[in-house]
Structures are given as structure tokens and as C-alpha cells.
Amino acid sequence: MKPRALLPAAPRTWLFALIAAAGAAQAADEPSTVYTVVPSDTLIGLTRTVLVSREAWTEVAKLNQLPDPNRIYPNQRLAVPLRLLRRTDPPARIVSADGDVRAAGQPVKAGDALPAGAVLSTAEGSSAVVQLGDGSRMKLAPASQAQLAEHRRYMVKAGTKATPEGEGLFATSMRLVKGTVEMLASKVLRAKPLEVETPTAVIGVRGTEYRVHYDPVLAARTEVLEGKVQADAANEAGQRGEGAAVDSGFGAALRPARPPAVVPLLPAPDFTALPTRVTKPLLVLQMPAGTQALRVQLAADPAYDHIVRDLYLAPGSTLPLDGLESGIWHLRARQVDSLGIEGFDAKLRFELKVLTTAPGLVPFTVPQPPGVVKLRWQPVADVDHYRVEVARDAGFTQMEHQGDADATSLRVIVAQPGTHHWRVAALKDVAGKPELGNWSEAGEIEISDPRAEGAAR
């Protein structure tokens, strides 16, 4: 196959030879990508589909030091500066927004666009997931803030399957201002590596799953769960300085003007002793004992897109579950080392049963005669039905009465002299079915013995 002509006969190759060396040096100093020539391509033709202008082909020719700028060949690889490529700036999309999530200070919801330059923030107990144009996902943890600094699609065929936005090469960078971002990078060709910047580091991603954290005390940290990242710390001038490649299963602490500290990730905590069903009043989970602090997150879904609680706990301490509704919840925790690097996740799916508050009993102050006894208790909000039990023993195994009441009092027959025990629980309608709440503390009913009273008289 003959190479395709690029120029009419008049322009000569000596013109490009004079400036080729200078062009190559310039190309090395700016972001660029590689374009692979296909049989139908000419440089002039590329100005109508790929390049920004008709003049751009001359710069591409000199930057690549083409021996003959009239000719390019199929499968030839050409370095093309990104500034010379046609591009669009598609918005990213909010996939989920739980709690107080804002972009540019305004509340956002699932389905909203997130344009380049927008700052996304989450409050305590809030989280968000953003899908980028190349299919990658960014998960912003509670109490975090990040900016979609760059989100461009260059009009070059990637040579792989189309991204969600169609054919093209993406260039995306995030700026993490505070908190934590989890990245799930899609496996597509890019115009340049997906980057997460912090005030003290740049994390250039060649991996697919990793985390980045930033706070003023511990500066920047990253953990790689799959793939590899290039982690560069800032130098004294605030520019990109010394870096390190961080493989899967390792993390790095990136502090200004220091070499990156790369360490293995700590193993996941042991969750084997944790219960898979938690019922009130035990509204806590006992965290595993150990020597490292734990970062603990609670979510409503197994993908941890909807995080509602995010906190650091000492090993062996308890995780409060107050304020959560009954249902299935997902817990994950990871150990945190002295550098602030977080290890592998331990995960637990558990059922939470939040029972209705127990009524307060109105106690008996004097013994009652055998026969009908009126039991009374305090009302529980939003409850109209109660279950009442009376027994001969404190363990409520020798039952004397068991029934329901539609008010906060009930008359029952207690004929046997001696001490009797009673308790009340609320019955609340949940999804069309009555659900028994917490039992009250047991009260005592002292029934007098008329024979003993008669003998005493």
C-alpha cells in the first residue's frame, strides 16, 4: 500500500527539517497523546475531524520530525499535543447524593450534571457518587470536598470500546480539598492518566481502584487496591517533586518536600465475632480489639455508595447505631497506621431491628386484694396498641395473663395471694404488620391474703 500524500507539490521537506528539532523539544514539555494512523488518514484530512485547525497539521509534522511531511503511513504513531486536538467538555453526572450534598454551594440530587470546575462537598453523614464520561466513578466520603478540575473528551478514536460519551480520549483531574475520595477508574485508553490532586501531592492513576485522603495534619495519603498509581509529592516550591510508583496492596504518605513513604496495607480487621442481627436495646456493635485505630463506615447498600456514618474508633470500642431505621445495613472497617494510611476492608452485612420504646409502668404502692387489678402505664408516641403479660415468676415462664390492650390501662384477674410480675410492650404497625417493641422493666403486684388478714384481726 502506498503512503498517502499530505501536501501539494510546492511545499518542500527542507522547511520542516529546519524546525523539527525545536518542535520535538516543545512536544516533550507539554501534555500530548499518541495517534495511530489508519489507512484512510492524511494530515490535512485530520484537520477536518481531529485537529483544531488547518494549520495544526504543520505543527504535528514538525513535532514528529517527519522526513517527508507529504507522507504518513498506516500504523504510524504520531505524537499530538492535546492543545491541537478538537475537544468537548461534557459534564459528569451525580449518580447518588445522600444527605447534605452541594455543588457550587447549591444542593444537588441524583441525575444532576456536574460541570468542569464545580466544587462538590458533602456534610457529616452525607456522601455522593459521580460518574465521569469515561465510565469511571468517584465516591466522595462524608465531610469531604473535591473539585472536578478538568473533564475533557478529545475527538480521537481510542481504539477500544466506546466510553459512555462515545468515541474519544478523556483527560480528567480531580482536586481533593479535604476528606476522602474513592476512585473506580474504568479500563479505557486516556489522553493522559486520571489524576487526583491535593494541596501537597498529585496521584496519577494507572490503576483501577484506589483511595486518596487529604487533611492539613497528615497531608496526602493514597491506598491502591487494584492496579498501580504514580504518587508525586510537592516540592518546596509547591510543584510536582519526588514520586514513587505504588502497587496494588500498598499505600503511600505524601508530605511536602519529603520522599513518599510507601508501605504495605494493613490486613482487614477480624469481624468473625460480630453479630449479624442487632436488636434494641443493644444498639451498638463491639469493634474488634487490636493495636490500630479503625475507620468505620456504615452504608445502606453493599457497594457503599450511600454512606451515612463515617468515623474513627479506637480498637475494642463500640459503634453506636442510634438514629438508624430497622433494615439491612452494611458495615466496613479498616485499620489505620501511624502515617494515616488505611488498610484492607472488613465487611459485615447485618440486620438491625429497632424496637419501639418501652412504656413506663405506673407502679403499685400498696398490696391489692385478690380479684380484678387495674394495670396502668405511660403512653408511647405514635402507638395505639400494647401487649401485657402477668406471670407468677420474674422470668415470665409461669404465665397468668397474656393479651393486648387498645389503651394505656387494662383490668386483669389476679387471684393468687403473693408476689406477681407484669410488663408491657408497645405494638407498632410496621409495613402492615404489628411489631412488638421493647418490654418494659418488670413491675410487681403484691396480692394480699384475706385469710392471713382475718387471722391477724
Image (tube, rainbow, N blue to C red):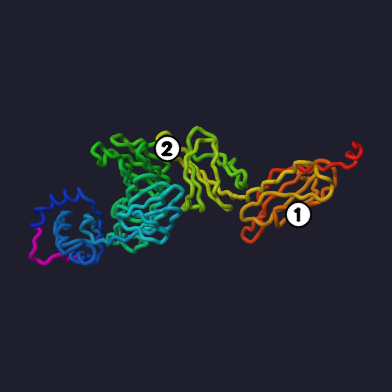
- In the rendered image, the residue lying farthest to the top is 291
Q: Amino acid at mark 1?
A: Gly
Task: Measuring from the top left, give residue 30's x and y in whole percent.
Answer: 21, 50
Residue extending farthest to the right is 455
Work out whether residue 395 can be spotted: yes
Indicate whether 28 appears above or below 287.
below
Magenta span covers which residues? Answer: 4-13
Q: Is residue 274 magenta?
A: no
**Which residue position is annotated with label 1?**
403
Cα gap from disc 1 to disc 2, whole angstroms? 60 Å
Quadrant into which the C terminus falls: top right
The residue that disc 2 covers is: 264
- Locate residue 307 relative to residue 364 in the image: left or right: left
How crowded pointer 2 is (Cα within 10 Å; few <14, some 14-19, many 20+) is rated as some
Q: Residue at x 45, y 54 (%)?
A: 98
Task: Return the disc, 1 or 2, that comes first in the chain's sequence.
Answer: 2
Lateral position of residue 424 relative to residue 257, left or right: right
Category of crowding for the residue at label 1, using alpha-carbon neighbours closer than 10 angstroms: few (below 14), some (14–19), many (at least 20): few
Residue at 32%, 39% in the rendered image: 244
Pointers 1 and 2 in contact (CB under 8 A)? no
Q: What's the residue type where badge 2 is placed?
A: Pro
Q: Taking 275 as reference, is 394 left or right? A: right
Q: Nearer the viewer, residue 386 or 61?
A: 386
SS at badge 1: strand
The quarter in which the N terminus is drawn is: bottom left
The dot on residue 443 is none
Q: Residue at position x 17%, y 65% from top?
A: 44
Give x and y (percent) for residue 263: 40, 36
